[in-house]
Image (cartoon, grey):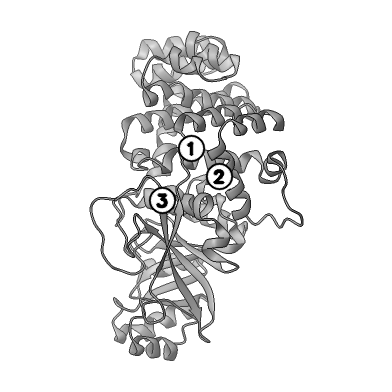
Amino acid sequence: MRSPGLTDGRSVSDNEAVTPEYVYLGRQPILDRNGTLTAFELLFRAQAGNFAQITDDATATAQVIARLVGDVGLSTALGDRAGYVNVERSVLMSDIVRLLPPERFVLEILETVTFDDALFRRCQELRRVGFRFALDDVSQPSARLVEFLPCVDIVKIDLLDCPRKHLAELVGVVRQHGKLLLAEKVETPEDRDAAMRAGFELFQGYYFAKPQTLTSRRIRPSREALLRLLVLLSEEPEIAELEAELKLNPHLVMQLLRLLNSSAFGLGHTISSLRAAIMVVGTRQITRWAQLLLFANESLLALRCDPLAQLCGTRARFMELVAGRLRPGDERFADTAFITGVFSLVHVLFGGALEDVVSTLPIHASIRRALLEKGGQLGLLLNAAEAAESGELNAIRAACDALHAITACELTALGLAAAAWHDDHVRDVHSP
């Protein structure tokens, strides 16, 4: 499929209709050779109609995960079946995908996505924790197919686009590598018979069932509440502190309980309190969820096209890298440097003066001092980041002199490394 929600290959419009009260999620059955339901592919839907309306693949991917985990719920969407989800590259490279219980999900990647070492390493990392991968939209034998096969477990062959004369050859290539075969866009009895004769193990398409649209009330916490939660999480809070913050935001509590219900925690007892839910889910999962909500309700196009998002990501990474040079092995300091870089631009995101925005957030004193006074080691790091961004040699040298542990050449190299890190996380978003 070209993006989440295009499994049925039908209508796509240029404008997403957004409703304030409800969210929608499509699903299409995947069956085995005996006609037994084994899984659902989950599809982006902007409205109740059974068709996709997608303007941005990254946004669609994030919203499928957000709606599945936070609004509709895993049990409602899948029951005890497995789920297939299309994943756009920038989302795949992020923590967002880890919100899904890995043993229950197959991540679908388009054959047209650029394959490189970074993508290979990420796929291997996710496979080690239990995710399976499917290569989507395959229609003919190719060198790219062979290149991808070591990274995937399932190959989805598009029967609408695959000429019958190439089907046997294509199946043979996949079989040689020991991968499962899934026939998609099975539209007619003839398609079904051809796929059965070719030896496909799994089947999906209109011949078996059209996608169904699931509807749920939208749960949308405010960006301000999400930002406060992320600030608190950056401080490694006590459970009681996190519980108190969540209690001020009923929508976030509802999301947390949905997250608990959607994840494969293997609980043997019922969660009876918010505190118990926090302890089971864990702060890292809550952090991932808050980050997803902060962006999924907006356009993820900003991750790769908005200059502010690019500056924020690059600055935060730069400060993290320099922190690692100043205090090797101190991961906590590096993490704090990263979040300081993010907070240094949050006033631009929300509008207003930095002092006004910072005054509304319970930011740690060392971060506050860095933001408002350029004080402390974090302040020196922020000053170095701004000097590197300016490109002014005198400013760079002055920043290096203040740090006492890094040269102008090293600072420039770390700036390039930070930019490369950001680019690697958002590259190929425009892949077709």
Expressed as whole percent of the image width and height from the top left, the position of residue 270 reads 73, 53
* Quadrant in which the N terminus is drawn: bottom left
| Vertical comparison of 398 with 9: above or below | above
| Vertical comparison of 211 with 54: above or below | below
- The tag on residue 67 is none
CA gap, disc 2 and disc 3 = 15 Å
* Quadrant in which the C terminus is drawn: bottom left
In the figure, residue 10 lies in which quadrant? bottom left
- Disc number lying in front (1 or 3): 3
Secondary structure state at the residue bearing disc 2: helix
- The tag on residue 255 is 2
Callout 1 amino acid: Pro
Q: Kindly identify which residue carries mark 1.
A: 221
Expressed as whole percent of the image width and height from the top left, the position of residue 157 reads 39, 75
Secondary structure state at the residue bearing disc 1: loop
**From this viewpoint, is residue 407 visible?**
no
Callout 2 amino acid: Gln
Q: Considering only order in the chain, which callout, 3 or 1, is on the residue closer to the N terminus? A: 3
Q: Kindly identify which residue carries mark 3.
A: 22
| Vertical comparison of 285 with 350: above or below | below
CA gap, disc 1 and disc 2 = 9 Å
